[in-house]
Image (cartoon, rainbow, N blue to C red):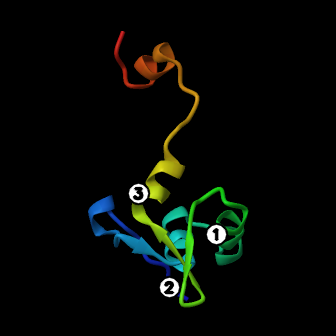
Amino acid sequence: MKRLHYADWNEVRITLTVKDIADVLNVCDTVALNLVRSGEIPAKKVAGQWRILKTDLMAYLQPSGWSGLQKRQRDGVP
């Protein structure tokens, strides 16, 4: 099955399926489903199928626990 590839977040729909997040994360559908079921990626069931907000997926992908110094170093700011 052909995977979707997104050039940037503007190409990603506002609501996603488990298959969509698997494509974005480049993981198998089972791994994506486990992330949703565990609550690591917030989701709601709509008509029996999981739906994930793009903003929730984006938040999941943000680095957490960065101190101010680490963030500045990462961003190349002295």
In the rendered structure, which amino acid carries the disc numbered 2?
A: Lys
Quarter holding the N terminus is: bottom right
Q: For marks 1 and 2, give the one nearer the viewer.
A: 1
Name, please, the residue furthest toward the top. 78
Image coords of residue 71 (percent x, y): 45, 22
Secondary structure, mark 1, is helix
Image coords of residue 17 (percent x, y): 51, 78
Label 3, on which residue? 55
Q: Which class describes the residues within 10 Å of circle 3: few (<14), some (14-19), or many (20+)?
A: few
Q: Residue at x 50, y 19 (%)?
A: 70
Quarter holding the C terminus is: top left
Can see residue 8? no
Please give the label number shown on residue 32: 1
* Spatial separation of the CA atoms under disc 3 and disc 2: 24 Å
Q: Residue 29's image quarter?
A: bottom right
Q: Which residue is drawn at 57% across and 61% down?
A: 42
Q: For marks 3 and 2, give the one nearer the viewer.
A: 3
In contact (CB < 8 Å): disc 3 and disc 2: no
Along the polypeptide, which appears first: circle 3 or circle 2?
Answer: 2
Left or right: 3, with 72 as reference point = right
In the rendered structure, which amino acid carries the disc numbered 3?
A: Thr
In contact (CB < 8 Å): disc 1 and disc 2: no
Left or right: 39, with 3 as reference point = right
Please give the label number shown on residue 2: 2
Along the polypeptide, which appears first: circle 1 or circle 3?
Answer: 1
Q: Residue at x 65, y 73 (%)?
A: 28
Secondary structure, mark 2, is loop
In the rendered structure, which amino acid carries the disc numbered 1?
A: Ala
* Spatial separation of the CA atoms under disc 1 and disc 2: 16 Å
Secondary structure, mark 3, is helix
